[in-house]
Image (cartoon, helix red, strand yellow):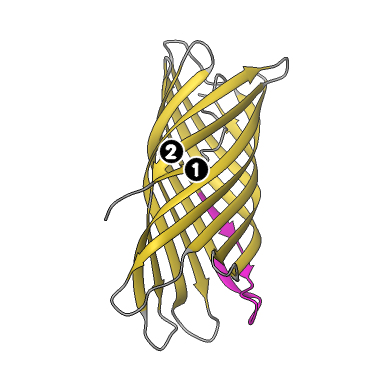
Amino acid sequence: MNHKLLLSIIAASIASASLNTSADTLFRPRASLGYSSYELTLTDPGDTLSESSYLKGGIGVTIATGQLYFDLGFSNSLGATYDEGVTPGEDFNRSDTTLTIGYVFSNNMTLFGGYKSGSSEFNNSSTSVSSTKFDASGPYLGLGIGFPSSGGTWSFNAAIAALSAELTDNDTGIPFNASADAVGFGLGAGYSMPFGSTQGLSFKANFQSYDYTDWEDPNYIPPDIQESIFAMDVEYYYNF
């Protein structure tokens, strides 16, 4: 399958000048709590397939040595439901995983890249299987910039990624398993605020929008679908 480029947001929690840039190795675990809204929409005629607003939790870890860092992050929705316009209140689950390697330059610019994966499951309470599952994953490459202030660091970033998506449905007369590429965009910002010599908080917000086109399936051809995600998070981290 041919990949298309898309713009996406990689959260601005630690991919900035707030990282330790000495020769010592930094080990930074973190935990987060946030709010997110998720929506799938048919781009023509613009009908909403499903939407959900929910709390989410996350964990992650960063290992940095000098100006190079590696990061692994995971987040998952907490007790979420979705509304498809007909049967509101059905079970919904969203998970995201990112694996990142980056380099922080002396001018507070960051070059980073890695692999990201997101999965959305829409479960019909009348069946024992997931009604619909929407997965997308692929590599990404991006730039970030940090602006130190008296109390912490502001940071902004964006990335280019090549994603492959898969849409599966087990709750129709003809179950389908369709695949497509994506093109999209995103904007994000964050603020990292240390307290003491080892701990800190990060606040971040981002918006992502992905357009999935040219679906391929032997039984069914879905129309173009737009996936939109907005999230706000508060993270607590500890440096070792």
Is 160 positioned to the left or the right of 226 in the image? Answer: left
Magenta region: which residues?
75-92
- Return the mark for residue 147: none
Q: Position of residue 2 (x, y in %)?
A: 28, 52
Residue most toward the front? 45
- Which residue corresponds to mark 2? 160
Q: Quadrant of the N terminus?
A: bottom left
| Residue 216 locus on image (x, y percent) | 32, 68
Q: Give above or below for 17 relative to 30.
A: above
Question: From this viewpoint, is residue 197 visible?
Answer: no
Determine if residue 219 is in view: yes
Compare residues 113 and 211 and report the one nearer the observer. 211
In the rendered image, the vertical position of residue 187 relative to residue 226, given as above or below:
above
Q: Please, what is the three-letter code of the amino acid marked with disc 2?
A: Ile
Q: Are dots 2 and 1 in contact, CB under 8 Å?
A: yes
Marks 2/1: CA–CA distance: 6 Å
Q: Quadrant of residue 160?
A: top left
Mark 2, secondary structure of its residue: strand
Residue 124 is situated, as x and y percent measured from the top left of the image, at: 53, 80
Q: Residue furthest bottom?
A: 173
**Which of the two labelled residues, at mark 2 and mark 1, occupies the earlier sequence position?**
1
- For residue 22: magenta? no
Query: On the image, numbered disc 1 is attached to which residue?
Result: 8
Tell me where residue 127 appears, x and y as whole percent.
48, 85
Judging from the image, what secondary structure is the residue with disc 1 in? Answer: strand
Residue positioned 59% across, 50% down in the render: 57
Q: Nearer the viewer, residue 236 or 66?
A: 66
- Identified at 64% across, 82% down, the residue is 86
Residue at 61 percent of width and 26 percent of height: 155
**Residue 234 shown left or right of residue 71 in the figure:** right
- Quadrant position of residue 173: bottom left
